Image (cartoon, rainbow, N blue to C red):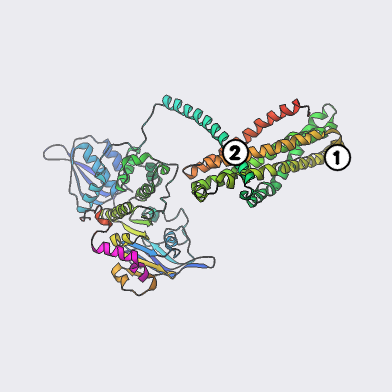
Amino acid sequence: MIEPADFTQDTAEEGGLILRLNGAWTIAGVADADKRLRALGDAVRHIDLSAVEHIDTVGAWIVYRTARDMGADIVGVNANARSLIEAVGGVDSNDSIAPPVISPIIKLIGELGDAVLTAFGTMVQFIAFMGQCVKAIIDLILHPRRFRIHAVVQHFEHVGVRALAIVGLMSFLIGIVIAQQGAVQLRQFGAEVFTVNLVGRLTLRELGVLMTAIMVAGRSGSAFAAQIGTMKITEEVDAMRTIGVVPTEALVIPRIMATVVMMPLLAMYSSIIAMIGGGLLCWIALDIPPATFVQRIREVVPFTDLLVGLVKAPVFGAIIAMAGCFQGMRVEGNSEEVGLKTTAAVVQAIFLVIVLDAFFAVFFTGIGWN
Amino acid sequence: MPDRDNIIEVRGLRNAFGDQVIHDGLDLDVKRGEILGVVGGSGTGKSVLMRSIIGLQNPEEGEIRVFGESMRDKEEDEATEVRRRWGVLFQGGALFSTLTVAENVQVPLKEFYPDFSKATLDEIARYKIHLSGLPPEAAFKFPSELSGGMKKRAGLARALAMDPDLLFLDEPTAGLDPIGAARFDALTLNLKQTLGLTVFLITHDLDSLYAICDRVAVLADRQVIAVGKIDELLAIDHPWINEYFSGPRGRAAKSGHDRGITKMSVDKPSPDGP
């Protein structure tokens, strides 16, 4: 059994202390001895290693540091210990291994400034990115053979077809919730029958497209950012450029196209499923049979409500896809960036969608589509 | 009773991915205090062999002993006594990207020895970084701010953090310029001599083989077809070995070595090791 690192103190003949080290001065057992050595005064003149059974670089460093700090000399060393002490002693510097410390107030002001600059910079970059997209679309119209129809169709599947199940389930539940909550509130006025108006108008005009947009931002916007970001890190995007393929044309435009085409379809589908859910609840809870429900929907929901939803959907799709691709293209450096930019893509997309939705609400009321 | 001089013993190893058999009946010994170079063509399973030994890849058959302890079917939280006695340098460095170099070095120390004070941890990180040949200011840089060669050195500093007895290096000189590669070779040899390491070195670099390896193991035909000093390997009549060592690059490395102007001359370590 090897004893852990330990030491005893003796008085040397010429005055001062002599430390006699014993046991195994290795990483496994040296932590305690290190603390006690640090607590010693600096009257030590010699450090005697002759009773040390085993030593590694951590032990050697602690011996070296103690000797240096106390101005002691090291005696009783064998060749192995000597070479270790020389190896670790070569780095005798007190350079801090932490970055220089800055006062918290200056740091706060600096971070605030950075954040403002980043926000403005991002906005300018996003506008530039939209310009790039427009330029790429014009180029593609002028050179239609460079248009990547296969990529667009592939993204149709990922953005549209594969989202059907989750968007459908979500819409069905939302329809039920609207109808149920509406019925409870309207019953107070004896106006349960208006639940049909609520379900029909709300889903077609607002919720169908908005919930679909949020779902697509979470599913596809994030996927776009992660895919393109990974390609940036593995230098695939750079490789494209050197070959002469424009990344905006090859990566960004197909994704935007696919999302712009799929969003109205998904939004329409979502509205219909939500109405089915609402209708089902009306049938069960309010005894409104399906035929009557459909009849009422046709009477109370104006055609413009459908148009409102269908006008908003492609715009939201474009915003979501652009935010995803934009953040993906901004990835630089390490893999952590991919995660950060993916989060940023989703947050930015949903934020912009809701801001635009508010503008649309005012706009459509302004032109009398209410 | 296993041979006490063998740090690693591999017996009858079989690895396969689906129908593709990588190793079949592979035997290999790594002796205490040597640098064993492992060479082989692309796809002969050099990295898979290393991953099997360090327990990242569970082999189909065979026995693997490291420091006399079987490494087969060990869970991630088992065999920690063995794990803390080895250090591994992955090809890309595999540094934790959210931590600085110094913090990377301190990860294994903090994990196994929480008793060390912050000051001592910092001192240990500082001299490990120095030992692996990095400048002091690299300590508070993040991996993304380092060049490829510096990442490998930082990875080496982390591999050395626990004062290992056994060091695994996966193509440490790949992607380095010749001067950087030569310095890394010199560093490996110097560390082996100073710290008494045993080194398992996967490499494609013929200069490294000549300069620092005590023995070389050749992987081909799903097995280790030969182990020995390079001179002994040159005498073996096997098409891959002949082509490898007697091809233009092999001859260039040998003549450079014979003339004594191989990379080791760049900064030769002191010969008076322990």
Q: Quadrant of the C terminus of chain B?
A: bottom left
Q: Nearer the viewer, residue B13 or A207?
A: A207
Residue at the location (18% across, 40% down)? A72
* Residue that numbered label 1 is attached to: A294
**Vertical position of residue A32 compared to residue B247: above or below:** above
Q: Nearer the viewer, residue A220 or A260?
A: A260
Q: Residue B18 occupies which quadrant of the picture?
A: bottom right
**In the image, are marks 2 and 1 on the same chain?**
yes
Q: Quadrant of the N terminus of chain B?
A: bottom left
Where disc 1 sits, the SS reads: helix
View extreme (bottom): residue: B237
Task: Residue A33 in the image: state x and y as whole percent.
Answer: 29, 42
Which of the two labelled residues, at mark 2 and mark 1, occupies the earlier sequence position?
Answer: 1
| Subunit bearing disc 2 | A
Amino acid type, residue under disc 1 in the picture: Val
Q: Which residues are magenta?
A: B242-259
| Subunit bearing disc 1 | A
